[in-house]
Amino acid sequence: VQEPSAIDPAQPKYFATVAFPYANSALHIGHGRMNTAADIIVRFQRLLGKAVLFPMGFHISGTPVLAVADGLARGDEKQRSITSAALAEYV
């Protein structure tokens, strides 16, 4: 982790981001592949002496989440089962 106080204002900056995974299902190997590739690039940029900002997180909006919410509101048993199983991995 690079402390903000240790960053020289004249130091070149590098910003990287990846598509955040949706929080409505379990993580899978594709998430690991995507984040690993980005992490390699970011670490290389740090080796080049750049101040790197690489935020990580989850995406909790958009069409997939809306579709899940609509399915749950309709009482869709299949959607309830899928959502319960996905949440059980984290709760």
Image (cartoon, rainbow, N blue to C red):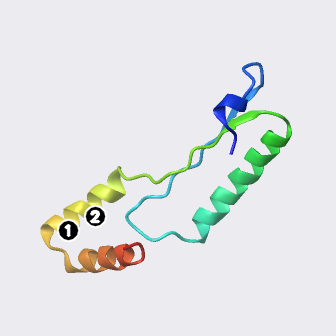
Q: Position of residue 15 (x, y in %)?
A: 65, 35
Image disc number at residue 35: none
Q: Position of residue 56 (x, y in %)?
A: 55, 49
Is 74 rendered above or below residue 39?
below
Tell me if 24 is positioned left or right of 73 in this view.
right
Q: Secondary structure at mark 2?
A: helix
Q: Closest to the observer: 16 or 5?
A: 5
Q: Position of residue 59 (x, y in %)?
A: 43, 52
Q: Position of residue 24 (x, y in %)?
A: 37, 64
The single residue placed furthest to the top in the displayed view is 10
Is 65 rendered above or below residue 48?
below
Identify the residue at horizontal 35%, vertical 80% (top origin): 85
Q: Secondary structure at mark 1?
A: helix
Quadrant of the snapshot with the N terminus: top right
- What residue would you read off at disc 1? 72
Is 79 rendered above or below residue 38?
below
The single residue placed furthest to the front in the displayed view is 5
In which image quadrant can residue 5 be found? top right
- What residue would you read off at disc 2? 68
* Residues at marks 2 and 1 touching, judged by CB atoms closer than 8 Å: yes
Identify the residue at horizontal 75%, vertical 24% (top origin): 8
Q: Amino acid at mark 2?
A: Val
C-alpha separation, residue under disc 2 versus residue under disc 1: 6 Å
Q: Amino acid at mark 1?
A: Leu
Is 72 rendered above or below residue 4?
below
Tell me if 72 is positioned left or right of 63 in this view.
left
Q: Closest to the observer: 9 or 48?
A: 9
The single residue placed furthest to the right in the displayed view is 48
Identify the residue at horizontal 21%, vertical 67% (top origin): 71
